[in-house]
Image (spheres, coloured by chain):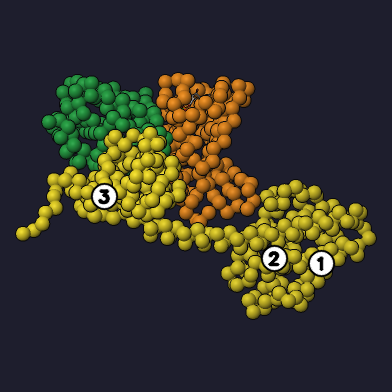
Amino acid sequence: MIGVVITTPLQSIVVRQDRDISVVRRAVSTHAERLNLSVLSRTRLVTASSELTRNMLVYGGGGVVELKVYRDGERLGLGATFADQGPGIDNVEDALADGFTSGVGLGLGLGGARRLVDQFDIQSSEVTGTSISVAIWLKDDGR
Amino acid sequence: MTLERIAIVKIEECLLVTIQVDMHDRLALTLREDLGERLLTTQARGVLLDISGLDTLDTFIARVLAGISSMAKLLGAETVLVGMQPAVAMTLVELGLTLEGVHTSLDVDRGMALLKKLLV
Amino acid sequence: MIKDLRQISTQTVGLIQEQQDEILKDWIESQLTADTLRLDLMDQKKLEQESKALLKALTAALGGQGRDFTAPNWQAVNGLLKEISEARDKAGFSPTETATFVLSLRHPLVERLLSSKKISSLDEEVWLLLDILDQLAIFTTEVYQRRREATIHRQQEEMEELSTPVVKIWDGILALPLVGTLDTRRSQMVTEALLDAINTTGAEIAIIDLTGVPAIDTRMAQHLMRTVAASRLMGANCILSGIRPQIAQTIVHLKINLGDIKTESTLAAALKTALATYGLKVTVSE
Ligand SMILES: Nc1ncnc2c1ncn2[C@@H]1O[C@H](COP(=O)(O)OP(=O)(O)OP(=O)(O)O)[C@@H](O)[C@H]1O
Ligand SMILES: [Mg+2]
């Protein structure tokens, strides 16, 4: 009814090395379990987070992952923002397309992550770097 | 630097790898190297990758696993990926990865049986 | 829901604060004499309590800084109204009766404003207050609506669960007879059910029977392919059976490669193939 999403911060994780990707995965998984997300939702969010964290590390030179509870009226969700101060994404449309990569990957990470989550917002510029927010809503309560 | 490694066990003609921990990138790459070496030294003809303990698989790790399979093939061995969890399988497909060239099986026993069939 | 509230003047808020007791008295009285009074559903004491609590919360909210309904100062009103609406729904009040409860505060409030000489730009203040109360009344009906939707949703889910059975038709063989067209949500549920069944039964073959499906759209076809791919990743093979010409056309049109996927004309034929994989054969006994 309200249509305004309120977020409450849970945890911040600084990402500097590839080890930190597992730290992010574990943290997302733990919070997902606490919030009672279904196994599938949890797996989707953890996987999307893993992709976005790795991108942040590879292309953005590292950054910060902020986990948060999303609330939209009655609805609860778990979300995360991945922010780096790297060079930004040249063409977001292109980058989201399956198969597009500027590196050696398969170019599935970004587009795949978007498919896996319920909410996906991306902001990117040369000046500010890249910030991507994702969330998955809890689905078992009749919404 | 800790020498963290995933154990590789030889059973008959096969190498069994049980991945239970959340596998970070370096660990996955180390596993690929180790497996290559073991295949060379043991002349094993099959590899069983048991991932029933993994509750996520992203594009990076999936690619390493697929890479292990193609590397093994070059070294004369077949690879079977066993025990992928339902949610992991669904998520991987949604990501766009179907690991076409990789053999799969429900569990270690059946994976072993499949390997035997592939190796005759 | 209240998007851009102009702030009520401090004069008005002050006045309402000062005269809160009188306003409450008038309000309760008007409720007790109204047609919509339902003492059969709720006693007078409860009515007085709720009125008092709401007026208090409203006064506090009006005095706060937030301009929209999601601001912190409106949270107490928000929560209270939700509680009241839910309780009244359960007790058997109609949505209109509950909205009327909020709307009946208009008179006593506006009356106090009008009889005060201290308020500047009186018209505007009155409209503003009426606006707010309207919005609050709408909110109560929304609470009803959401409760209804939640119930319907639950029932729907239960029905869907019943209509997507995964049956174990033989040791190691599952069958998934699909009926009708599947929307995205149901497709998801079907897939989840199948993958879970593969996991728990250890079946290596799943027959997806489309005999009961008249036609499929692009989405469903793609979803079907994903289901087959996910099953394979787990180590199980799918056989598609009962594909109608129309469905075959969709699949061809989508250039989906059926190369690796086994298909059979009928469920029976698929079962025969599946049994053969296990080295089994159906014969007529002598
Ligand atoms: N945080 C980022 N900063 C700058 N560029 C980015 C960022 N994230 C993604 N990109 C750009 O978007 C492209 C697509 O990203 P995507 O994750 O889809 O593919 P990939 O990382 O190249 O391959 P894969 O994820 O499949 O291994 C990248 O190649 C890169 O050019
Ligand atoms: Mg990537």
Amino acid type, label 1: His
Placement of B65 over or under C102, stated as above or below: above
Secondary element under disc 2, as helix, strand or loop, is helix
Q: As drawn, which residue projects farthest toward the front?
A: C245
The hue in which chain B appears in the rendered picture of the protein: green
Q: Indicate which disc residue C99 carries.
A: 2
Q: As drawn, which residue projects farthest toward the left?
A: C286
Q: CA distance from mark 3 to mark 1?
A: 72 Å
Badges 2 and 1: C-beta atoms under 8 Å apart?
no
The hue in which chain A appears in the rendered picture of the protein: orange
Report x, y in % for residue B11.
16, 33
Disc 2 sits on a residue from what chain?
Answer: C
**Badge 3: how crowded within 10 Å, few (<14), some, or many (20+)?**
some
Q: CA distance from mark 2 to mark 3?
A: 58 Å
The hue in which chain C appears in the rendered picture of the protein: yellow
* Foreground pick, B37 / B84: B84
Q: Residue at x 38, y 60 (%)?
A: C162
Disc 1 sits on a residue from what chain?
Answer: C
Q: Residue at x 13, y 45 (%)?
A: C279
Q: Earlier in the sequence, mark 2 or mark 3?
A: 2
Q: Which residue is mark 1?
A: C107
Residue C53 appears in the picture as rendered: no
